[in-house]
Image (cartoon, coloured by chain):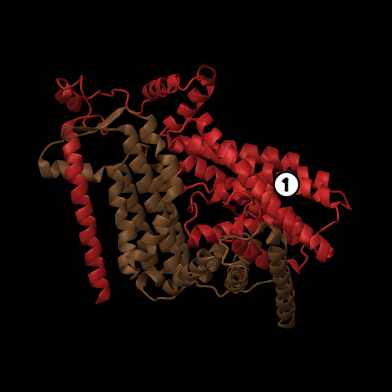
């Protein structure tokens, strides 16, 4: 039950961050989505045993977090919250792959461990970049950007509607569950006898609310068309942002920057 | 269970994105064509309802553990498959964006796994077949449970396939399958029970909500065939693009063909090591112990042979990594300081 409340707060927190006004927030939302997509594809395209060559890519989330004044803890907390599944699947790599891969002094690290840590790094990069996208853009602008990128309107409308009502419903559900918890000696979950009635009641309220919303919309001239405020500005800064980062991603993908820097430092290759 | 970005190759992620985008566009067209305008807000609110309901713990009798709701079947029953698919897609999108469930590259996979199977396979082919115009409670129960279980089994199988073809996880196909399917059998049974409880409640209290009109002829065959074709074409194009990492597919194919020999667990490790060697990314792989003499000539032969074992390149790699992280930290700090002024 507490889980629900904290998730709701999480949503609100990201929304509040998205309402900030920094130079990253002001960038064109389409550009931010495209840059994120390029980043994700580049990260995924690294080969299984690339570990240290992934490191330079951490510049991207770090630079954005600093530039957009996002608190490090907010992103880190969410990244940690979703790590179990990847750990669960990834941990089999070191167990199954014992081929030697990397020598650190007397220690020999197997390829299994290298691919395991590679998966972890990919995970952190991918999750952080997605969260940063939302925390610097916000749902409204993402919606308008999706429309401009020719995502079916029906889907965008659905997305925006859902997002709007999430707040209302989560609040209602958390009240309902609090009431249930107080009357059931603070049970942690729903007893199976009330599965149907509890969810069913919530559903009825939901549907009734949808009806009222629909009537209110009709009164205000709704004809099946949702008009979203558009953000049309595409400036030179936006283009430079996208091209600059893409170039950096590609350079980091093609050249093993840490290896090169290390060779430069130590004088060996 | 959500598929994750970190386990995906661009080829698999891209292929699933294309398929899902196609399905969503087609569904959007379908919904728009026979648009019951009332449905627009209903879809939105039901999406939010499923989102919220997924957070409730359902205590499973006599076990002490609790289960969760996926919601695909409830949506399909209340909205029909097309609108339900769009609704699930929107739920998963918000979850991927705000809670990092899965991730953006894996979003295509997740919408497909959790949306396509319940809406376009389990609902029309199982639920609709069992439930007639005037279903009894027992019929509803069997129909919903069967549909939920099979929908989730297919979804879990799809996760296994996607992970496997991406080739990042070392988990052998059969082992992963044996891990995923039973877990999802349990999840599917809970899902079926919760869905049945809700639908029966609605059936008793306000039966008019549940659609009873027959589905407009869902012609699944052309849809499935074209889906398969798109998947293969896109995966082919993308994997030839991403040929820097060809071992994913190779590995999986040799593993599939080698399944008959893979009977006991003792041979499992040998077999994997063998496959590893055969499909090794670096053909002139050097083993650390035996090759100390030829270390110099190995590095001469292949100047950038990371990650062949060579303590020289390793030392440079480690020093370089630390240096890179320091550099990134410094640049980050610099950006932060300049941003404040």
Q: Which chain is brown?
A: A
Pick whichever, B5 or B335, lies toward us.
Answer: B5
Q: Residue furthest front?
A: A185
Q: Which chain is red?
A: B
Is residue B233 positioned above or below A72 on the image?
Answer: above
Residue at (68% x, 48% y) in the render: B118
Residue A182 locus on image (x, y percent): 59, 71
Residue A134 appears in view: yes
Residue B244, quarter of picture? top left
Residue A239, quarter of picture? bottom left
Residue A234 appears in view: no
Label 1 marks which chain's residue?
B
Residue at (38% x, 23% y) in the render: B273
Residue at (12% x, 36% y) in the render: A268
Identify the residue under disc 1: B145
Residue at (14% x, 25% y) in the render: B296
Q: Residue furthest bottom?
A: A219
Q: How many marks?
A: 1
Is residue B120 positioned above or below A208 on the image?
Answer: above
Q: Residue furthest left?
A: A267
Residue B340 locus on image (x, y percent): 26, 75
Residue A46 locus on image (x, y percent): 37, 41
Quarter of the image for the C terminus of chain B: give it.
Answer: bottom left
């Amino acid at each position: 039950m507490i889980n629900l409340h904290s998730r709701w707060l999480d949503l609100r927190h990201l929304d509040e961050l998205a309402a900030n006004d920094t130079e990253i927030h002001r960038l064109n939302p389409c550009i931010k989505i495209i840059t994120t997509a390029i980043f994700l594809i580049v990260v995924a395209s690294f080969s299984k045993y690339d570990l240290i060559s992934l490191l330079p890519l951490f510049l991207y989330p770090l630079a954005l977090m600093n530039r957009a004044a996002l608190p490090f803890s907010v992103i880190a907390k969410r990244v940690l919250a979703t790590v179990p599944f990847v750990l669960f699947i990834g941990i089999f790599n070191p167990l199954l792959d014992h081929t030697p891969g990397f020598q650190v002094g007397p220690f020999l690290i197997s390829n299994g461990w290298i691919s395991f840590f590679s998966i972890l790094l990919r995970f952190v990069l991918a999750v952080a970049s997605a969260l940063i996208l939302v925390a610097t853009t916000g749902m409204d602008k993402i919606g308008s950007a999706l429309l401009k990128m020719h995502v079916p309107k029906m889907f965008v409308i659905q997305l925006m509607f859902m997002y709007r009502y999430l707040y209302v419903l989560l609040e209602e559900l958390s009240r309902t569950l609090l009431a249930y918890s107080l009357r059931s000696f603070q049970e942690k979950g729903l007893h199976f006898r009330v599965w149907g009635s509890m969810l069913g009641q919530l559903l009825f309220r939901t549907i009734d609310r949808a009806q009222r919303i629909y009537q209110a919309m009709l009164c205000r001239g709704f004809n099946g068309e949702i008009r979203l405020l558009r953000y049309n500005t595409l400036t030179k800064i936006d283009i430079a942002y996208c091209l600059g980062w893409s170039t950096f991603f590609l350079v980091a993908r093609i050249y093993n920057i840490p290896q090169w820097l290390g060779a430069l430092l130590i004088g060996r290759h | 269970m959500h598929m994750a970005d970190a386990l995906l190759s661009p080829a698999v992620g891209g292929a699933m994105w294309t398929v899902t985008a196609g399905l969503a566009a087609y569904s959007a067209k379908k919904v728009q064509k026979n648009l019951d305008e009332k449905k627009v807000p209903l879809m939105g609110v039901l999406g939010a309802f499923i989102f919220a309901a997924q957070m409730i713990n359902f205590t499973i009798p006599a076990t002490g553990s609790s289960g969760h709701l996926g919601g695909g079947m409830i949506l399909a029953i209340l909205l029909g498959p097309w609108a339900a698919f769009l609704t699930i897609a929107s739920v998963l999108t918000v979850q991927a964006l705000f809670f990092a469930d899965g991730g953006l590259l894996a979003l295509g996979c997740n919408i497909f796994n959790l949306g396509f199977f319940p809406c376009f396979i389990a609902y029309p082919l199982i639920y609709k077949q069992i439930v007639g115009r005037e279903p009894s409670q027992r019929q509803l129960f069997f129909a919903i449970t069967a549909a939920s279980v099979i929908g989730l089994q297919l979804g879990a199988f799809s996760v296994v396939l996607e992970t496997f073809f991406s080739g990042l996880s070392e988990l052998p196909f059969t082992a992963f399958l044996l891990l995923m399917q039973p877990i999802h059998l349990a999840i599917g049974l809970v899902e079926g029970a919760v869905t049945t409880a809700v639908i029966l409640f609605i059936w008793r209290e306000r039966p008019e909500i549940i659609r009873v009109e027959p589905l407009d002829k869902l012609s699944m065959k052309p849809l499935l065939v074209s889906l398969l074709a798109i998947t293969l074409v896109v995966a082919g194009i993308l994997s030839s693009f991403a040929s820097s990492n060809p071992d994913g597919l190779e590995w999986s194919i040799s593993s599939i063909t080698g399944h008959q020999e893979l009977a006991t667990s003792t041979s499992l490790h040998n077999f994997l090591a063998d496959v590893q060697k055969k499909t090794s990314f670096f053909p002139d792989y050097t083993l650390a112990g035996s090759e100390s003499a030829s270390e110099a000539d190995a590095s001469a032969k292949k100047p950038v042979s990371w990650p062949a074992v060579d303590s020289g390149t390793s030392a440079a790699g480690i020093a370089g990594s630390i240096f890179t992280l320091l550099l990134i930290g410094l640049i980050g700090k610099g950006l932060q300081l300049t941003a404040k002024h």
